[in-house]
Amino acid sequence: MIPELGHFALILALCVSLVQGVLPVFGAQNGRREWIVLARPAAQIAFLLMLASFAALAWSFYVNDFSVQYVAAHSNSQLPTLFRFGAVWGGHEGSLLLWVFMLSGWTVAVAQFSRTLDDAMVARVLGVLGLVTTGLLLFILFTSNPFDRLLPAAENGRDLNPLLQDPGLIFHPPMLYMGYVGFAVAFAFAISALLSGRLDAAWARWSRPWTTAAWVFLTLGIALGSWWAYYELGWGGWWFWDPVENASFMPWLLGTALLHSLAVTEKRGSFKSWTVLLAIGAFSLSLLGTFLVRSGVLTSVHAFATDPRRGIFILVLLLLVVGSSLALFAWRAPKVALGGTFALVSRESLMLVGNVLLVVACASVLLGTLYPLLIDALKLGKISVGPPYFNAVFVPLMAPVLFLLAAVPLAKWKNADAKDIALRMWIPAGLAIVAAILVPRVMGGWTVMTAVGVALSVWIASSGVIQVARRLKAGFPPASFWGMHLGHFGIAVFVFGVTMVGGFQEEQDVRMEPGDTVLVGGYNFKMIGVKDVTGPNYSAARGEFEVTHGGGAPNILYPEKRNYFSSTMPMTEAAIDAGFTRDVYVSLGEPLEGKAWAVRVYFKPFVDWIWGGCLLMALGGLFAVTDRRYRMGLKSAAASAGALQGAQP
Amino acid sequence: MNAKALIPLVLFAVLVGFLAVGLRLDPHEVPSPLVNKPAPAFKIAQLEQPEAQFSPEDLKGKVWLLNVWASWCVACRQEHPVLMDFARAQIAPLIGLDYKDQRKDALGVLKRSGNPYDITAFDADGRVGIDYGVYGVPESYVIDKAGVIRYKHIGPITTEALQKTIIPLINELKKT
């Protein structure tokens, strides 16, 4: 009965979303007040219905209702309760339901926090969101209904994929989806602005906190996924340029460009059509990512079940949403988007360069991701594109972005003095050069790549610190200032981590017997032995390793090789001793003859700085969202934005 | 409207064109090295009569369909009605290979939902599956009179695949 109620709530949500998507938009275009005011209550009701539907599915998992096909396929009575909850979005149908649930969450948040925005604009924004929701609900109901029954009921479920039985899974997809879906809000604002013809500073100011919030979630989601892959897959890597990873990274790149472009539009009224295009692009890539992941047109380590009907449905949805948006853009943008002027060297021009580089980097990732598909479609064979392409193309594109990033906050709007900027950057430049010479030598060998990485990292971090110190003399700066510098500092930390791991990690694959030792990165690993242990739904071989460094006390690590009862694929649980400046990492490979095992031992310097950097970026975004000027009423915001346009900062 | 503003739309149209073509291709459809090779030989116990054995040799001179399935395989349930139709039509012998399964579970499924198979071979440890290059259940193989694999179908057999590809192929092979 509960699953049917969930199904019914989903159908009702579709009807309400359709009303929310059609009437308020027409009302706003034709000035019909009674239709305009429908937007808010419709968004609220749709959210409640989605909540009910999601709760019904979660309940079916909680009570092990194996007469629901989706539950039978992704859960098991032996699965621990926490993972049963995570299993709700462990498969295709449930994760789409989560997608739409979050979309309705963002929609209702816009409805709640837009009291000061004029009603017609709210009606358009909520209407666009309602249309997107309608499309995705149709997709769920027609091709991916999570409430389909399985009669007779299965005796037990097939169990959740063991790879996904991890606390990381519980948080990774919701974070990622919050980010993906959050760009729908920026998209809706952009479309509304095109519809109304009002592409002004107030529009940019309204879009900014929403875009930043979505970007924060996406950053955290990607970082969590990367961290999860690092400790769960047992390969010791943190990024694989897998199509599914790329699908989340492309919206991030465009979202980052959008954040900065919005800042220019708000402050200076420039880049209007560019900003609108980025807003459409970021959300389109979120939808494209969903298409790539869910249609099975690409192979990936995230092997998902595929169904050609689903692919065609999402493609049509993509065509309608993105095609109509871009057509609207082509029709309206040239009329409504006339920006201010700026000199060749100015904050605008530097940000534009950075922005274009981010977009080109995103395009290069898109090309690499889709290239196998293009080649296959042109009947030229089946190929795959791997990390060598991405590293060769992506890294050189990002290096100038990182170089610019340190100096842009020093440049004045409209017309900046290049000599003045250079004069103020000589301390960071000196520090960067010294660090680039010294740090790689200390770590164990100088190479061009590590020197460039260290130099860029120190360049960004030190110029940020100096700018903050100078600004503090003039009084306490607002939250958005802190947000920007924290975010940029996070990038510096991230770049440092990536450089160190890339340049100085050590790894060994060795055959070990109890009593054997191996020395990696100055750490001595001694194998004590391997024992059999039993978990709630798996049995495992658990190794015991004693790790010593210098004269310090030994540290015991327990890597495991698990066999889940429901699966034939053995799972590796690496044991990691994490530290501020390094991780040591042991994972069990295959059992060899006698008591010997193939063992992988890694030394990863500064690897946690990669995720630490992401966390700082997200924190920076969070600071920026809380800036108090976003809480001012729209009228005063519009007025002050107008005033800003005339004045020199 | 000016031409520059149309560029994103045009680029998007090209992308959609490629995606639409890509949808009809299957990246998993790596050509199987076993197609047009003799089906690997094996001799293992049958599911329903553990004392009797099954070997592909037994069907020499006939065109037949080998379907790899398991009771734990949810996609197999989706495929099951299609196989029932195939069995009813009596086009060719349908042999099941119960892959990495428990005898009790497998028999339970056949009892509850019907048994389309003429014989089911019981591959408890998955060794036969390895010889046949099975990497996901279900998979199906069309094997000709000389014992050569002529076609491999990955994933659940759909009614469409059955009517348009598998049955015509079987009828073709029967004539030779």
Image (cartoon, coloured by chain):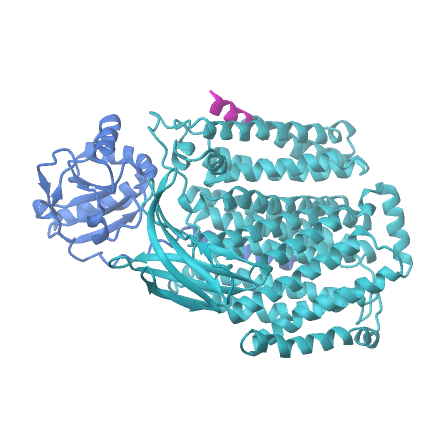
- Eyeballing the image, is A119 above or below A197? above
Q: Residue at x 62, y 47 (%)?
A: A179
Q: Residue at x 35, y 65 (%)?
A: A510
- For the stretch drawn in magenta, what is the main secondary structure? helix
- Viewer-proximal residue among B24 and A125: A125
Left or right of residue A100: residue A377: left
Q: Please tell me in which quadrant of the rendered image residue B34 appears.
A: bottom left
Q: Which chain is cyan?
A: A
Left or right of residue B75: residue A166: right
Residue A205 location in percent, x, y?
79, 48
Residue A519 location in percent, x, y?
43, 68
Write down the region rendered in magenta: A1-10
Give the tally of numbered discs: 0
Q: Which chain is blue?
A: B
Asked if one can make out residue A642 in the rendered structure from this viewpoint, the answer is: yes
Quarter in which the C terminus of chain A is drawn: bottom right
- In the rendered image, the residue lying farthest to the top is A1
Residue A332 location in percent, x, y?
72, 51
Q: Residue at x 27, y 41 (%)?
A: B163
Residue A406 location in percent, x, y?
73, 67
Q: Is residue A317 magenta?
A: no
- Viewer-proximal residue among B25 and A244: A244
Left or right of residue A569: residue B172: left
